[in-house]
Amino acid sequence: QVQVIESGGGSVQAGDSLRLSCTASRRTRSVQSTAWFRRAPGKEREFVTSINWDSGRTDYADSVKDRFHVFRDSARNTMVLQMESLRPEDTAVYYCAVRYGASFSIESYSKEGDYGYWGQGTQVTVFS
């Protein structure tokens, strides 16, 4: 059984920063990609960012480019999302997703269906 655990959410003022972390309980050797998605109140869940653990490729939604930065800490089996210059429209529940794969990949995985394991979500609230 794989557990995906997010941490680091909270409430901040516009312009502040937050760091989210995601850890998967299963060993990292076969992790192919991890991603963050978010669901704002009254909206569908949307892609935020992903990182391919084989190639290091990162992808970002246009709404967060140049403000959010994703990186992995393989030694700690953790993905980190550094969020800067937060805006009220960033308010959402943020979900971590994990994709395992047996073969080397350089692909970008940005769809919900690309991921088989999800965390419970962590709330991020940004006040104006």
Image (cartoon, helix red, strand yellow):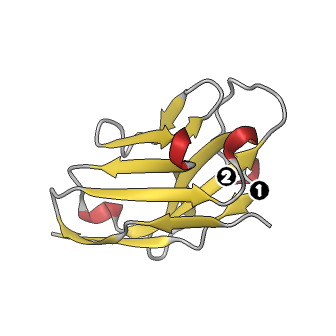
**Residue 28, position as x, y percentages in the image:** 68, 44
Alpha-carbon neighbours of circle 1 within 10 Å: few (<14), some, or many (≥20)? few
Q: Quadrant of the C terminus?
A: bottom left
Alpha-carbon neighbours of circle 2 within 10 Å: few (<14), some, or many (≥20)? many
Vertical arrangement, residue 71 with respect to residue 44, above or below:
above
Vertical arrangement, residue 66 with respect to residue 24, above or below:
above
Q: Quadrant of residue 69?
A: top left
Of residues 74 and 79, which is closer to you in this image? 74
Of residues 73 and 51, which is closer to you in this image? 73
Specify the farthest residue to the right.
102
* Element at label 2: strand
Q: CA distance from mark 2 to mark 1?
A: 6 Å
Question: Mark 1 sits on what residue?
Answer: 116
**Residue 104, position as x, y percentages in the image:** 77, 25
Q: Residue at x 22, y 56 (%)?
A: 17
Name the kind of residue labelled 2 in the image. Answer: Val
For this view, does 101 lie left or right of residue 53? Answer: right
Q: Residue at x 31, y 62 (%)?
A: 89
Q: In the rendered structure, are the residues bearing label 2 and label 1 in contact, judged by CB atoms less than 8 Å apart? A: yes
For this view, does 34 lie left or right of residue 72? Answer: right
Name the kind of residue labelled 1 in the image. Answer: Gly
* Element at label 1: loop
Specify the farthest residue to the front.
75
Q: Residue at x 61, y 23 (%)?
A: 55
What label sits on residue 98 in the rendered view? 2
Of label 2 and label 1, which has the lower sequence position? 2
Q: Quadrant of residue 74?
A: top right
For this view, does 8 lie left or right of residue 88? Answer: right
Is residue 49 visible to the viewer in this orientation of the structure?
Answer: no
Is residue 111 visible to the viewer in this orientation of the structure?
Answer: yes
Vertical arrangement, residue 37 with respect to residue 70, above or below:
below
Q: Residue at x 62, y 34 (%)?
A: 53
